Image: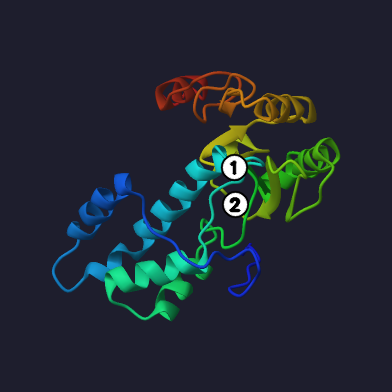
Amino acid sequence: MKKPFDLHADYQPESFAFSKAREKTVAEIIKRYPEGRQQSAVMPLLDLVQRQIAEEGAKANPPYGGWVPRAAMDHIAQILDMPPIKVYEVASFYSMYNLAPVGKYLIQCCTTTPCWLNGSAEIVNTCKSHLNIGMDETTKDGKFSLMEVECLGACVNAPMVQINDDYYEDLSPESMKEVLDLLAEDMNPQIGSQKGRKASMALSGPTTLKDRAKKAKVV
């Protein structure tokens, strides 16, 4: 589900530049691609922008999360010698890029079928009521933004949410509140399954095809 943005909004900064620490990374990224194909670096450079802004935002008061301003897209277009519209097209196509300001902790709630069948509606309602915000809104303190997304590929461990780069899986309303409370204090909740599941194994424990075959008496 694509996130809303406005290239001409008041929140758009007038300029952007990569930090000194990241200039070397920019050059290294561009070198990954063959001569004449440097424009392929547009996606990792957009990600680099978002991460730089997230680091800056974590130190701000109020805090904010990573996003990609228009000025940054224009800067990437200049670096890669490509029309700015081409950068806008890439950034607006992929949902991993935030094109408007978000909270320090971006909560992406999966509501696709497997998560929905396992109670994602309760998880969404828990986030809304606990944070007192709706979808595509940010808390007044700048710490949390909430949005709905399509499948995040952790269907076995549904319901789940992605918060910044981390997955929180096998959620219940209670464990979701605990995750939010810890993040509100800038603490580190346990990532992954909230039920102690290892990777994506069955809750009853690990199995092998050999075990299944013996149980079915086919070997």
Question: Which residue is at a point 35% across and 65% down the rendered structure image?
Answer: 42
State the SS at label 2.
loop
Q: Is label 1 or label 2 in front?
A: 2
Left or right of residue 143, residue 51 in this image: left
Instruction: Pick the residue in front: 80 or 168.
Output: 80
Residue 188 to residue 161: above or below: above
Quadrant for residue 172, please give it.
top right
Q: Is residue 45 visible?
A: yes
Question: Which residue is at a point 69% across and 31% down the rendered structure image?
Answer: 171
State the SS at label 1.
helix
**Figure quadrant of the C terminus:** top left
Left or right of residue 162, residue 73 in this image: left
Q: Residue furthest left?
A: 35
Instruction: Pick the residue in front: 89 or 218.
Output: 89
- What whole-number distance in Å separates the C-alpha atoms at marks 1 and 2? 8 Å
Q: What's the coloring here?
A: rainbow
Residue flagged by tag 1: what amino acid is it?
Cys
The image shows residue 203 at horizontal and vertical percentages of 60, 23
Question: Which residue is at a point 44% across and 68% down the rendered structure image?
Answer: 73
The image shows residue 207 at horizontal and vertical percentages of 48, 22
Residue 149 to residue 211: above or below: below
Residue flagged by tag 2: what amino acid is it?
Cys
Instruction: Pick the residue in front: 204 or 67.
Output: 67
The residue that label 2 is drawn on is 151
Left or right of residue 4, residue 96 in this image: left
Q: Are marks 1 and 2 in contact (CB under 8 Å)?
A: yes
The residue that label 1 is drawn on is 155
Question: Which residue is at a point 55% across and 60% down the rendered structure image?
Answer: 95
Q: Residues within 10 Å of mark 1 (few under 14, many from 20)?
A: some
The image shows residue 60 at horizontal and vertical percentages of 59, 41
The image shows residue 31 at horizontal and vertical percentages of 17, 58
